[in-house]
Amino acid sequence: PALAFALSNAAPNPFNPATTLRFTLPAASHVQLRLYNVQGRLVRTLERDQLFSAGHHEMSWNATDDQGCTVSSGLYFARLISGGQVEMRKLILVK
């Protein structure tokens, strides 16, 4: 069966101190994977515009921002953009 573009639910979720984001690409493409807080502010860029092969991939987030500071407990959103498609998932950090 053909692979479909997808961002799976983070695991574990809720999490502390880290969670894993898994995604699937049907074809090789550039990926942006960013994390936002509940106010919509960019917190962390995990991938800016990296080329990934088709298939299954995973990345971890250790609840830090782009400056390396630990973020506070709360609701966050992971946004995956690739090949003109976008998916978002909720993440809950509990300390």
Image (cartoon, rainbow, N blue to C red):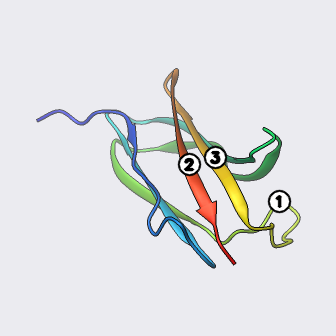
Task: Looking at the picture, tell me which residue is in the foreground, 50 or 11.
Answer: 11
Q: Position of residue 9 (x, y in %)?
A: 42, 52
What kind of residue is marked 1? Asp
Asked if labels 2 and 3 touch by Cβ distance under 8 angstroms, the answer is yes
Q: Residue at x 69, y 78 (%)?
A: 95
Q: Is residue 69 above or below residue 87?
A: below
- The label shown at residue 75 is none
Q: Residue at x 58, y 56 (%)?
A: 91
Q: Position of residue 19 (x, y in %)?
A: 54, 69
Q: Position of residue 62 (x, y in %)?
A: 66, 72
Q: Residue at x 52, y 62 (%)?
A: 59
- The label shown at residue 90 is 2
Mark in front: 3 vs 1: 3
- Label 3 crowd bin: few (<14), some (14–19), many (20+), radius 10 Å: some
Residue denoted by label 3: 77
Task: Looking at the picture, tell me which residue is in the foreground, 20 or 54.
Answer: 20
Which is nearer the N-term, disc 3 or disc 2?
Answer: 3
Taking the image as shown, residue 76 lies to the left or right of residue 57, namely: right
Task: Looking at the picture, tell me which residue is in the foreground, 23 or 91.
Answer: 91
Which is nearer the N-term, disc 3 or disc 1?
Answer: 1
- Label 1 crowd bin: few (<14), some (14–19), many (20+), radius 10 Å: few
